[in-house]
């Protein structure tokens, strides 16, 4: 985390001098110590974050792919008036343990055009889909499978 804070510091400054580097290192170390003492951050979280990067990259790729495919589907509904959508409200409970994974899933569903997470309570999701076909795979699709693998890695 301290390395990322330092890199962010360098990017914000836009140039690199000895003074900027020394001051940035001092600020980064102070923020890291603050996070460890006051916010409950542990050095092992840095390792878990690094270990999760390949899975996070796959998840981001899947999200971009689903957004693109869903955008094309929504464009088809907009431009082809013969295809009438059947809106549906779907309730399901994905097999995710952590609140973080559930929040990431809810956000991913909402980011995908044509679907929106209406409610999420006690691990149960309620999602509005513009068409019934968009509800396929919400409860056990690629998002859920990658999030389960991420939870298992933690």
Image (tube, rainbow, N blue to C red):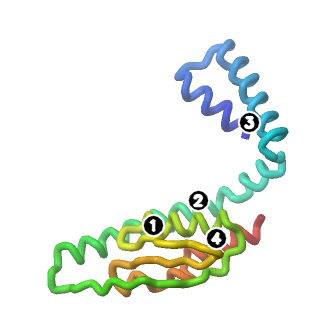
User: Which residue is located at x 61 percent, y 80 percent?
Assistant: 94
In the rendered view, tell whether residue 77 sits above or below residue 154. Answer: below
x then y, percent, for residue 77:
23, 77
**Quadrant of the image occupied by residue 71:** bottom left
Q: State how far apart marks 1 and 3 are (Cα).
A: 32 Å
Q: Horizontally, is 147 left or right of 43 in the view?
A: left
Distance from the alpha carbon under mark 3 to that under mark 4:
26 Å
Mark 1 vs mark 2: which is more N-terminal? 2
Q: Which residue is mark 1?
A: 110
Pinpoint residue 126: horizontal percent, then vertical percent.
Answer: 50, 78
Question: Quick one: SS at disc 2?
Answer: helix
Residue 104 at x, y percent in the picture? 58, 64
- Cα distance in 3D space between marks 3 and 2: 21 Å
Tag 1, which secondary structure?
Answer: helix
**Residue that appears at 58% across and 59% down:** 57
Pointers 4 and 1 in contact (C-beta within 8 Å): no
Q: In what element is the residue under mark 3?
A: helix
- The Cα atoms of the two marked residues, 1 and 2, are separated by 19 Å
In percent of width and height, residue 65 lies at 44, 67
Q: CA distance from mark 4 to mark 1?
A: 16 Å
Q: Is residue 28 above or below residue 83?
A: above
Pointer 2 residue: 57
Residue with the mark numbered 4: 147
What label sits on residue 2 in the rendered view? 3
Disc 2, disc 4: CB below 8 Å? no
Q: Residues within 10 Å of mark 4 (few under 14, many from 20)?
A: many
Task: State the image quarter where residue 38 is shown.
Answer: top right
Q: Are marks 1 and 2 in contact (CB under 8 Å)?
A: no
Number of the front mark, 2 or 4: 4
């Amino acid at each position: 985390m301290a390395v990322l804070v330092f890199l962010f510091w360098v990017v914000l400054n836009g140039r690199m001098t000895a003074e900027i580097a020394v001051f940035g290192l001092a600020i980064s170390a102070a923020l890291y110590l603050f996070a460890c003492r006051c916010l409950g951050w542990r050095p092992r979280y840095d390792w878990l974050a690094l270990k999760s990067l390949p899975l996070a990259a796959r998840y981001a790729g899947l999200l971009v792919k689903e957004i693109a495919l869903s955008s094309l589907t929504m464009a088809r509904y907009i431009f082809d008036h013969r295809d009438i959508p059947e809106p549906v409200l779907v309730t399901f409970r994905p097999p995710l343990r952590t609140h973080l994974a559930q929040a990431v899933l809810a956000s991913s569903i909402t980011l995908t055009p044509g679907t929106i997470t209406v409610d999420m309570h006690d691990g149960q999701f309620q999602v509005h889909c513009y068409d019934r076909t968009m509800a396929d795979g919400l409860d056990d699709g690629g998002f859920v499978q990658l999030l389960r693998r991420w939870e298992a890695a933690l």
